[in-house]
Each structure stands twice: as C-alpha cells, then as structure tokens.
Amino acid sequence: MTRVGRDALLPRYLRASRQEKTRILDEFVVITGYYRKSAIRLLRRGPNPRSFDRRRRPKVYTNEVKAALLQVWEAYGRICSKARLRSSHPSSQRRC
C-alpha cells in the first residue's frame, strides 16, 4: 500500500468504531505485510519523518586543544583512522 493509500485510509480509521478499526487493521496488515503493532502505530500517528538535515551544535575547539591534537596527529605519523590510533597505542591493548 502506498502512502496515498494509507492517507486515504487514515481518516476512515480514525473515526471508525472499535470493530471497524479491527476490520480495517486486518485488511491493512494483509495488504502491506506489516506487523499488526507497526500498522497500528502507522495508522494512529503516521510515519516518523526522518530529517537528514539535522542541525547540531557546531564543534568548537580552542587553540590549545587544536595544538594538542596536531601534536598527537604528527606523533602518530598523521594517521587518519581511529581504529589505527587505538590499536597503536600501548594502553589500548587491554580489553574493556
């Protein structure tokens, strides 16, 4: 069922009685293949919008932190992987 189909079904589902909701939900589950609980959530609230344009706080490093990071980066031969940095440091050999 497409979003258009769900949007057409949504008003009917919201104003339906309990028995009608059961019947509508059964049809929806058969047509879409959703699990029943997922179908209920979808029909009650709609899909969760996923925003790919999330705004986060900007990363702010002081000049002291930048200088320290630069020294560490240079000391490790300008590696770029966290995994390599972790595995090359002697204290990281122990397991957590």
Image (tube, grey):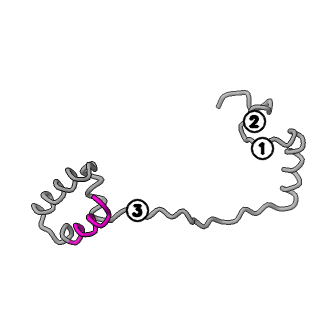
Look at the image and give the residue range highlighted in magenta.
Answer: 1-11
Residues at marks 3 and 2, CA–CA distance in whole angstroms: 37 Å
Q: Badge 3: few (under 14), some or many (20 or more) residues near its Cα, within 10 Å?
A: few
Residues at marks 1 and 3, CA–CA distance in whole angstroms: 36 Å
From the image, which quarter does the N terminus lie in? bottom left
Q: Determine whether label 2 and label 1 are within 8 Å by CB.
A: yes
Task: Identify the residue position indicated by label 2 in the image.
Answer: 84
Q: Badge 1: few (under 14), some or many (20 or more) residues near its Cα, within 10 Å?
A: few
Left or right: residue 29 compared with residue 83: left
- Amino acid beneath label 2: Arg
Query: Residue 43, position in %: x, y?
Result: 27, 63
* Element under disc 2: helix
- Amino acid beneath label 1: Cys
Residue in the foreground of this view, choosing between 89 and 28 = 28
Q: Determine whether label 1 and label 3 are within 8 Å by CB.
A: no
Task: Identify the residue position indicated by label 3 in the image.
Answer: 48
Left or right: residue 21 compared with residue 93: left
Name the residue at 20% across, 50% down.
30
